[in-house]
C-alpha cells in the first residue's frame, strides 16, 4: 500500500490517519502547526497565515489564524479518536524573509506568528515537543501519520527530523 499525500495549502488545514502524509510547501513567515496523537495515530496540520484575526478583514476561514485553526484541528482529529490530552504539537516556519528591508527593531510577521501559535497551543494544553522556526529561509514540512515522524526540509539547510 502506498502512502496518501495530502497537501495543506496556505490558510488551509487537514487531518489524516493511517498511511496519510500531510505536507505543506513554501513556509516563509507562515507557520505550520503540526499536531499528533500517537495512541490512535491521527495527525493534523494547519498552514496559518496571520497571528491574529485583527490583521485581516472579517474571514470565515478557520485555517488562517492559530486561534481558530487549533480548535478546528482538534475537532477534526477528535472525529478519528484523537484526544487533546495525548496530542503533542510541533511548529515549523515563521521566518523573517525580508528582515533586511525592515527598520531596526521591527517585529517581523514570522516572529509574531510563532508567538501567537505558542500562546494558542498553551491555551489548549498542548505540549510543544519540537520547533524549526525563525531564520530567514523557507521550509517544507511533512508528517507521516503512521508513526508521527516530522521532516523539515529547506534549500538552505537540508533535511532535519523534528
Image (cartoon, rainbow, N blue to C red):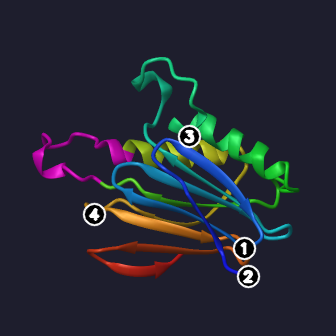
* Residues at marks 1 and 2 touching, judged by CB atoms closer than 8 Å: yes
Residue 38 in picture, x, y percent from top left: 79, 70
Residue on which the image places disc 2: 1
Residue drawn at x 12%, y 51% as measured from the top left: 100
Q: CA distance from mark 4 to mark 1?
A: 29 Å
Q: Quadrant of residue 83?
A: bottom right
* Residues at marks 4 and 3 touching, judged by CB atoms closer than 8 Å: no
Residue 146 in picture, x, y percent from top left: 73, 75
Q: Residue furthest top?
A: 58
Dot 4 or dot 2, earlier in sequence: 2
- Mark 2 vs mark 3: give the one in front: 2
- Say which mark, if any, is on residue 137: 4
Dot 3 or dot 1, earlier in sequence: 1
Whether the magenta-drawn stretch holds residue 137 is answered as no
Q: CA distance from mark 4 to mark 2?
A: 35 Å
Q: Is residue 8 left or right of residue 98?
A: right
Label 1: how many residues lie within 10 Å, few (<14), some (14-19) or many (20+)? some
Could you say whether the residue bearing mark 2 is in a helix, strand or loop?
Answer: loop
Label 2: how many residues lie within 10 Å, few (<14), some (14-19) or many (20+)? few
Label 3: how many residues lie within 10 Å, few (<14), some (14-19) or many (20+)? many
Q: Which residues are magenta?
A: 96-111
Residue on which the image places disc 1: 19
Q: CA distance from mark 2 to mark 3?
A: 34 Å
Q: Is residue 45 left or right of residue 30?
A: right
Dot 4 or dot 1, earlier in sequence: 1
- Say which mark, if any, is on residue 65: none
Is any part of residue 2 visible from this angle?
yes
- Mark 1 vs mark 2: give the one in front: 2
Is any part of residue 65 visible from this angle?
no
- Residue placed most toward the observer, 129 or 28: 28
Residue 43 in picture, x, y percent from top left: 71, 61
Amino acid at each position: 500500500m502506498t502512502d496518501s499525500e495530502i497537501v495543506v495549502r496556505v490558510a488551509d488545514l487537514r487531518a489524516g490517519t493511517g498511511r496519510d502524509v500531510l505536507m505543506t510547501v513554501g513556509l516563509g513567515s507562515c507557520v505550520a502547526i503540526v499536531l499528533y496523537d500517537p495512541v490512535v495515530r491521527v495527525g493534523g496540520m494547519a498552514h496559518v497565515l496571520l497571528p491574529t484575526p485583527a490583521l485581516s478583514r472579517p474571514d470565515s476561514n478557520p485555517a488562517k489564524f492559530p486561534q481558530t485553526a487549533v480548535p478546528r484541528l482538534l475537532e477534526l482529529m477528535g472525529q478519528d479518536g484523537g484526544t487533546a490530552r495525548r496530542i503533542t504539537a510541533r511548529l515549523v516556519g515563521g521566518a523573517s524573509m525580508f528582515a533586511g528591508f525592515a527598520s531596526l527593531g521591527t517585529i517581523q510577521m514570522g516572529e509574531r506568528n510563532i508567538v501567537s501559535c505558542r500562546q494558542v497551543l498553551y491555551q489548549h494544553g498542548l505540549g510543544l515537543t519540537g520547533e524549526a522556526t525563525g531564520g530567514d529561509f523557507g521550509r517544507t514540512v511533512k508528517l507521516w501519520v503512521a508513526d508521527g515522524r516530522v521532516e523539515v526540509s529547506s534549500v538552505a539547510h537540508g533535511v532535519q527530523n523534528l
